[in-house]
Amino acid sequence: MAKTPNESGDRAPSRRLASLGRGLIYAVAVAGGILIYAYGFQVTQVSLEEARSPSRQERLVRILRALAEPDLVEYDEQETTAETSVWVPCPKTLPAFEPPSGTPSLSLEPRCGAPGERITAVGNGFPPGADGRVYFVPPNGIRLSQAEFRADTDGAFSVSIQLPERASPEVQTVLAAFQRNVGAPRLTRNAYDTWDKIVETVFMALLGTTFGTMVAVPLSFLAARNLMKDITGTVGGLALIVMALPVGALLGAIVSRVALAGSAAVTSSPFATAVVASASLAVVARTLRWAMPSEETSTPSLRIRAARIVALLVASLLGLLGSVLAARLMSYVGDQLAELLGLAAFIGTFLADLGDVLELILGAAAVGGVAVVVASLSGTLGARLRPRLPPSARRPYDLTLSALAGAVLGLLLGAFLAWLYRLVDVRVTVVAPAAVGAVVGLLLGWRAGTGDTFPIGLVVYNLTRTVLNVLRAVEPLIMVIVVAVWVGIGPFAGVLALSLHTVAALGKLFSEDVETIQSGPLEAVTATGATRLQMIVYAVVPQIVPTYVSLTMYRWDINVRLSTIIGFAGGGGIGFLLSQNANLGNYRAASAQILAIALVVTAMDYLSTYLRGKAV
């Protein structure tokens, strides 16, 4: 239908008002943007006034020229000088001028002057482009620097110098000197130091990536929602797990100490220790193949499942003992090799240190493993006990366990605060935390509802993600400051800082990769009656290996760059050497380290890209 003239006339004002409104909105937005950026300029002190300062421009030019000449190569130097006489003040009778003989030569204009007066030194016959310095030499022979010079294409220069403030009746000397390179070039001490530190940096990144990846892989499974969302239980079961964790950790510490005490005979009988360790690990490998078969022809019975659980527990304890024996044996053999290998003693030292690291990891693994096993058994026990209770008793059962779990957590928190702040008041460290924890646990148990299932897996998932997020929020530069207080300034502090940040970064990336895997293989393996551990080994791991390898190599590339930064905070590597030279104003030496960093980072980028292409 065609619009009437009245309708068109009525809409014209409304369109103008709408256009005017949009214009006002745009104007307000522009004004707001100008206000924000104006305040930003004020806060960040953006100003070119200092940059225009001649002194700052001169310093910038000097630094840029120094950076353009990295201290990598040096020569033997031969000094060439030219000198002439000067009188301060002018004598009554000035000796006749004798033209300088030979080249190079130096003359003064004028040849004498009053104390503090400025005169001009003129040089001729110098090599074109020669850099040198003009000195005033009093009768005692000490060189007093006056000015720098650079000869032009004709080998001449002219600089202004100032005569000393103290007069002397004796004739004095003005000397121009420059250094000439002779012989073959050779690497400087700074070049060797740069090479040592860049190698140290690369291996800091390698060890940090390796240690971080070892921890990030198991954490990534706990931080994957698709693996954890199906793990459910009851509120009471979760409360039992919370209470069982510290008990399991204590039992794990006891087991670890027993295993360490049982391995003390390694120094008295290395051969017997090697036999026991090998036999233990062989039995463990055989037991694992039986308890975790790659294929199931039918759903295993309850008796077989129970037997497999018992076998896995026994294998774990036997594996811990065998591994501790192997670690102690490795340390013993490493110490013996270090004494025999001479220049290659670092190989023996590596074995000894590796044994110490493995022993430390095994102790922590024992504590964590036993805690997880005890907590898992407690959760299973609680899940089977609750259905046998009368329906009217299930709610009080859950609330009671929730309150107890809250009290346990409160007691642990109170003990930590007592240690941290050196508190001795029992009311503050025991009574109050337990009471507050019990009330909070009771409220959370009430809030969870009356259902028979509770998403335990999602609770673990959220806790793990929170820990990873907190670790990732702390930069390695901050981590190395704290770690350096613990282990001292040096590359080991850098390795630990990189390891912590690698755990957080790769844990997040790995878990996100697990969340994108295909669900078909998981369902197929689960349908055969496989345990969750078997499901991860046979359905999850084959899908994630290529991406895990790719991300790990990419993280190594990142850690190489981070290693150069944490050195500024005492983390060792080339960053530590670079910070020293920069603070001392030795920019030629710093330029060598900057060049080495650029070359290594570029090479690592190409290498990691190539390896990722091969792995994926």
Image: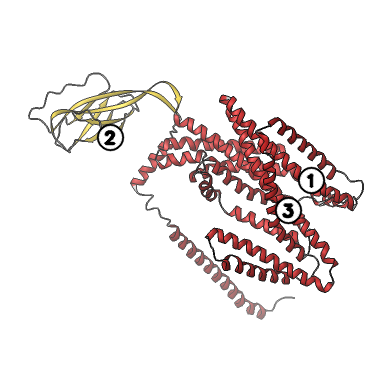
575 or 595, nearer to the observer: 575
User: Which residue type carries mark 3?
Assistant: Val
Q: Closer to the N terminus: mark 3 or mark 2?
A: 2
Badge 1 marks a residue whose secondary structure is: helix
Question: x%, y% of residue 462?
Answer: 69, 59
From the top left corner, tell me how far across and down residue 363 is, in percent: 66, 46
Colour basis: secondary structure
Query: Considering the numbered disc 2 on the image, is that residue within a helix, a strand or a loop?
Result: strand
Which residue is outermost to the right? 298
Q: Quadrant of residue 452?
A: bottom right
Mark 1 is surrounded, within 10 Å at the Cα level, by few (under 14), some (14 to 19) or many (20 or more) other residues, namely some
In the rendered image, is residue 215 in sight?
no
Query: Viewed as shown, does residue 80 lie left or right of 367?
Result: left
The label number, if any, that marks residue 314 in the structure image? 1
Name the residue at 39% across, 43% down.
60
Q: Is residue 303 above or below residue 240?
A: above
Which quadrant: the N terminus?
bottom right
**Amino acid identity at mark 2:** Ala
Are the two marked residues, 3 and 2, in contact with CB atoms closer than 8 angstroms? no
- Residue tagged by mark 3? 372
Q: CA distance from mark 2 to mark 1?
A: 82 Å
Label 2: how many residues lie within 10 Å, few (<14), some (14-19) or many (20+)? some
List x then y, in percent, for residue 160: 24, 35
In this rendering, the answer to whether 118 lies above or below 107 is below
Q: Residue at x 69, y 36 (%)?
A: 326
What's the amino acid at mark 1? Val
Horizontal relation, residue 265 to residue 42: left or right: right
Quadrant, the C terminus? top right
Give the residue pinned by disc 2. 147
